[in-house]
Image (cartoon, grey):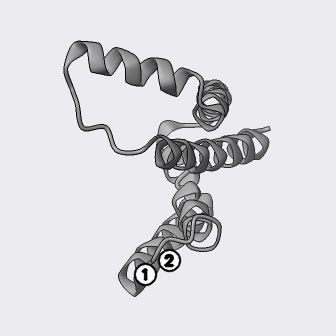
Amino acid sequence: MTWIYIAVIVLATTAGEVMQAMGMRRHGEIRDFRPNALGRVAAALARNRFVIASVAAMAVSFFAYMALLTVAELSFAVPATAVTYVLETILAKYFLKERVTALRWAGAGLVVCGVVLVSL
């Protein structure tokens, strides 16, 4: 059951963060931080389908993480779910068309090494 929870967390977190990036790119930069302006931003984001889907995916991830902590130790759960960083880097490069430097790929590779070490 532990690995099922980890898979759900990784997939939901990755999907949620990619959709959050898509939604915020679609919305645009927030430049006005006055209370009325922030209210308008919140209202606009509440209608953004990518942001809504992101919140739903992150909620799934949160509850799966709570379930994971009932069957696994925190010292295992945190590093094991860190594989999301690798998947997000790959999706950022190929799906969001972001420029990913060699240094970022190296960092993602080190995360994979850490996940492997913890899962042994």
Which residue occupies the extreme left position in the image? 34
Residue 24, placed above or below residue 113: above
Whether residue 64 is visible to the viewer of this picture, yes or no, is no
Relative to 5, 27 lies left or right: left
Q: Does dot 2 land on a helix, a strand or a loop?
A: helix
Relative to 104, 117 lies left or right: right
What amino acid type should be assigned to the residue bearing mark 2? Gly
Residue 101, placed above or below residue 115: below
Q: Quadrant of residue 97?
A: bottom right
Q: Quadrant of residue 91?
A: bottom right
Q: Does dot 1 land on a helix, a strand or a loop?
A: helix
Per the image, the residue denoted by label 1 is 106
Image coords of residue 79 (percent x, y): 50, 53
As drawn, the label of residue 109 is 2
Q: Is the residue under label 1 in contact with that under label 2 (CB below 8 Å)? A: yes
Q: Quadrant of residue 117?
A: bottom right
Q: Quadrant of the C terminus?
A: bottom right
What amino acid type should be assigned to the residue bearing mark 1? Ala
Structural distance between the alpha carbons of marks 2 and 1: 5 Å
Residue under the image location 60 percent in, 70 percent down = 90
Q: Looking at this view, is 105 or 27 the one in front?
A: 27
Residue under the image location 62 percent in, 28 percent down = 52
Whether residue 117 is visible to the viewer of this picture, yes or no, is yes
Graded by Cα atoms within 10 Å as few (under 14), some (14 to 19) or many (20 or more), the crowding at tag 2 reads some
Residue 92, placed above or below residue 8: below
Residue under the image location 68 percent in, 45 percent down = 6
Q: Quadrant of the N terminus?
A: top right
Graded by Cα atoms within 10 Å as few (under 14), some (14 to 19) or many (20 or more), the crowding at tag 1 reads few
